[in-house]
Amino acid sequence: MTVSGADIARVFRAEHGRAVSVLIRALGDIDLAEDAVQDAFTVAVERWPRDGMPPSPAGWIITTARRRAIDRLRREATREARHTEALALHAADENTAATQEGPVKDERLRLVFTCCHPALSREAQIALTLRLLGGLTTPEIAHAFLVPESTMAQRIVRAKSKIRSAGIPYRVPRDEDLPARLASVLAVLYLVFTEGHTATAGADLGRPDLAAEAIRLARVLVELMPDEPEAAGLLALMLLTEARRPARTDAAGELVVLAEQDRSLWDRALVDEGQALVHRCLRRGAPGPYQLQAAINAVHTDARTAAETDWSQVVALYDHLLRLAPTDVVRLNRAVAVAELDGPQAALALLDRLDLDGYVAFHVVRAELLGRLARWPESATEWDRAAGLSDNGPESRHLLARAARAAGAAARTDDRR
Amino acid sequence: MKTYLISLFSPDGPPPEDLDLTTVMADLEVVNADIRAAGGWVFAGGLADQASATTIRRPRDGVADAVLTDGPFAEAKEHLGGLTILRSDDYDVVLGWAERIAGATGLPVEVRPFQGDGDPGQAPTDQ
């Protein structure tokens, strides 16, 4: 079998976190580990097309990276002696422990928790996670978040330097710290996903690559922490959201809202996988915010048509979620479900108590509810406001179109008077 | 083993009247005792009011006189009010102590490592 550049790139992406985490442990230095893994892939690009893919690509990369690191350190005699010591210390288990799945699992978990340490800014956590665990290049991450490459490079350098100088530990947190620290990891992955689902800015509604990367990393986390229901809940939430992607835009790339989506376009395999995860989670009886959001999405994906949605179930799940996460954004989403059960007037009354003026979705929901009450001029104003707040091309075009429709309805109502 | 500075920032002016300083100091002492017990203690102390500060500037040319200004270096609503210097090989433990100091005083706290891994200054005489 011939090995193509694309095959190697795929292996690189898939095995980067594994290889870097083992090397960080062995070398005690993130940059050194990254360079070594990069070297190993350079060797792979030369050899694999000629010799074929090794039986364990990850093991091959780790072993080669370690040898390259030793060479590099010998060449750069100026490096501190402790690196060489660290190498000597770990050289013994080179071909055994470090390349076996068990210990490597722990290494990757350490890496996740270091990248998402609360002493790092959220932006730095996201960049480091995608870079080290995800194996994305700095230009790829910069492109995904629409920042200049130099900005992203600086962000990553600064984060690594803080890890080194502050002494941010490379380990899985103690049990008593785990819930808070895991929340930080989940938040990072979810932010990557939501940016992929609806980009903050740009000509396209979302960035499928970024969403796919978030799902891949969430799968890794579930594999590493099978006993954490919130990790599974997050994965389920991502899968059930991603499943609807094919129906979220029409042929022209314009946004189609949930109620109007062609549900036959939903990705059935993702829906099934997500729903199975939700059911498995809920049986454990430890529902957290991600599991509940996944459960709400499971109710939506259960309905063959928008009209068949079990709204009382949705409201009940939001009530539960509100007890765990009493935020205005959750209250807003709950109000949408209340509108379906008790009518738009009841939902509008709920909205009046929220403080979400700069939030696109708040104005979308208000506009929609006002429209259902035929209060067209107010509705048009809200659609306009929402469009003004959105930097996403397809989204803001959709909102402007709705504003024009509402304004048209307002004019017609005026004429009849 | 790394050495860290924990700085405490207090708003200018006298402490709020309903604040029981005795309790605050007692709560702080509990944290300090734990830092000592863990072998991390170097130094801690509270500073006098920022109005008592004098800022000194002098060029490196060896000629110009020093210029003294009555007041703190930076104009701000909050100034360095106290500091703790400690050693630890576990950053998470240091953050935990800092969280407790913040909780005991209700003031924002900054954790900052000294450069390098070694002892940043003279070893204290009591060790």
Image (spheres, coloured by chain):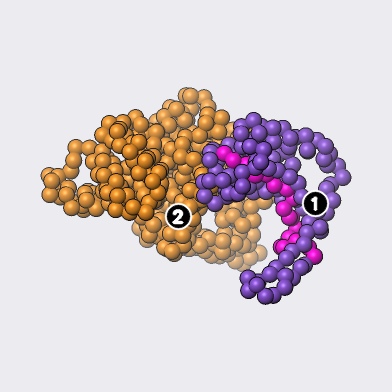
- Asked if residue A399 is positioned above or below residue A100 in the image, the reply reads below
State the orange chain.
Answer: A
Res. A185 visible in picture: no
Disc number placed over residue A156 in the picture, else none: 2
- Asked if residue A390 is positioned above or below residue A270 in the image, the reply reads below
Residue farthest along the bottom direction in this orientation = B63
Q: Are marks 1 and 2 on the same chain?
A: no
- Asked if residue B86 is positioned above or below residue A103 in the image, the reply reads below
Is B20 placed left or right of A39 in the picture?
A: right
Q: Say what secondary structure mark 1 lies in.
A: loop
Q: Residue at x 75, y 58 (%)?
A: B77
Amino acid bearing label 1: Ala
Mark 2 is surrounded, within 10 Å at the Cα level, by few (under 14), some (14 to 19) or many (20 or more) other residues, namely: many
Q: Magenta span covers which residues?
A: B70-88
Is B96 placed left or right of B55 in the picture?
A: left
Res. A127 visible in picture: yes
Query: Residue A39 placed where, x, y %?
Result: 27, 51
Query: Chain B hue?
Result: purple
Query: Residue B24 placed where, x, y %?
Result: 78, 38
Residue farthest along the right direction in this orientation = B17
